[in-house]
Amino acid sequence: MKELKQLMKDVVLHNIGIKVLSLIGALFVWLIIINIDDPYKTKVFQVPVETINESALQSVNKVFEITSGSIANVKVGGKRSVIDRLDSTDIRATADLSNLSSVNAVNIVPSLRKKVSSDVTLECTQVLKVALEDMATKQVKVTVVTQGEPSEGYSIGKCTAKPNMIQVTGGKSVVKRISSIKVFLNVEGVSEDFMSRLEPVAYDSNDEVVKSNTLHFSQNKIKVRAKVLENKTIPVRVSVTGTPAAGYEYVETECLPQEIQIAGSEKKMESLSEIVIPMDISGLNDQSGGLEKTVSVPALLPEGVTVSEEYETISVKVTIEKLVERTLRIKETDVAFRNLASGYVATAGAPGDILSLTISGRASILNEIPDTAINAYVDCGGLKAGEHQVRVQLDLSDTCKITKYATIKIHITKERGGSTASSSPSPTTKPTERPQNTTSEKPSEEPIPTETPSQEE
């Protein structure tokens, strides 16, 4: 046993110096080989900077906006085999706002997001700079804006946003600019009710988008429910009531458009066949200010029925004309005899006798009636032989009337021995308005026809 131990000792200690040098040399060669095969390498990565501990500023009612340093250049050193496997997403760069300096700057600290097989070094010499501002908040109503067109025959009804008010937080100057919050709803091709979740967008009074890193909403998604309604086209009718001022006459009413397109549930629209616009013309004349007006259609519709934007208003115009008078002078010999009994003849007046009658009506009509179109006549119905004082009538349209009548004395006789006599004089087509001789006029009150019997010849 002692001999064995001595043998082992001699083997280990024999040329011990050479053996130690050989071991050191082997290690050195191994290090050289490793460095040649997997050398040390550095690489710069561009990494977005994350801010942490923002609550430190919020606690003093401040908000911040990054002015520089939002992207950090991080230098990473290590073995090539490790560095080559890294990209920018494996590196994190943070700025701790609780360490903000007096000049509103803070160091950017890089770190690795994952473990690697060997040590690496990370270096960043940049700083993050921010601008501080007082914090402000306010409640703003959410407005739903539709984009696109629904399917043919359908309209978009009420769009309900939930919540319909959200709290906006940010820098005082930014929040002050905000006048509305909008969400944009795509309705292209829809034909039934639907719901969507939309991102809110802040707008100023000029309808420009308000953007800021300090801006935050109490809700990042707004739930919007949209009602899709069936369309229906109905006529517009103007209901005119009242009487215009004395001496004036109602002519007509015009409205544009004459039809509108409404939308609603089938049940609500079943009973809606027209839209009626009331128009009171009591006491109005042609200079009154109430002859033209613009009517809001939604105010005339029942709840649950909507009207498309292009038909939201209707323009109504009422025409009222002043009544004027016109005096006519007609030859008595131009007066025709109507409804004269068979077997009788009638005569009246002398060739130079003139009748004067006054008619009234709208100026636009009276001025267009030619003299030749006005026919004068007397109604001989029921009159027997003899002399009669009867009222002269005129063939006028319904828009004109006689305001001052004239009467004429006619003589009716029985025809002699089967001879044929005309029941009316040969017509003179154009009555004259130039007075000749003495006119035969009577008061405007209706005269009572008189009959003077004569002895038959």
Image (cartoon, rainbow, N blue to C red):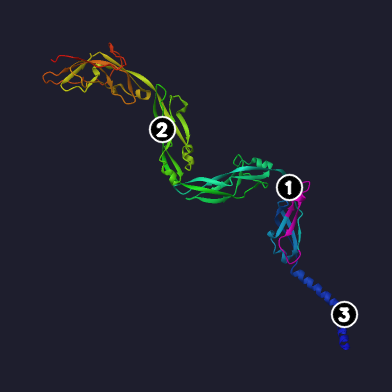
The quarter of the image holding the C terminus is: top left
Image location (x, y in percent) of residue 454: 17, 14
Marks 1/3: CA distance?
69 Å
**In the picture, residue 72 is in which quadrant?**
bottom right
Image location (x, y in percent) of residue 215: 66, 46
| Residue wearing tag 3 | 16
Q: Earlier in the sequence, mark 1 or mark 3?
A: 3
Residue shown at 81% from the left, 75% from the top: 26
Observer-side mark, 3 or 2, equals 2
Density class for disc 1 (Cα within 10 Å; few <14, some 14-19, many ≥20) is some
Query: In screen coordinates, is 144 left or right of 370?
Result: right
Image location (x, y in percent) of residue 165: 60, 44
The three-letter amino acid code for the residue at tag 3 is: Ile
Q: Which residues are magenta?
A: 94-119
Task: Confirm whether the magenta stretch covers residue 95.
Answer: yes
The three-letter amino acid code for the residue at tag 1 is: Leu
Q: Which structural element holds mark 1? A: helix
The three-letter amino acid code for the residue at tag 2 is: Ser
| Residue wearing tag 2 | 239
Q: Are marks 1 and 3 in contact (CB under 8 Å)?
A: no
Q: Which structural element holds mark 3? A: helix
Q: Which structural element holds mark 2? A: strand
Density class for disc 3 (Cα within 10 Å; few <14, some 14-19, many ≥20) is few
Marks 3/2: CA distance?
127 Å
Observer-side mark, 2 or 1, equals 2
Task: Confirm whether the magenta stretch covers residue 42.
Answer: no
| Residue wearing tag 1 | 57
Residue shown at 73% from the left, 47% from the top: 59
Q: Are marks 3 and 2 in contact (CB under 8 Å)?
A: no
Q: Mark yes or no: residue 333 visible.
A: yes
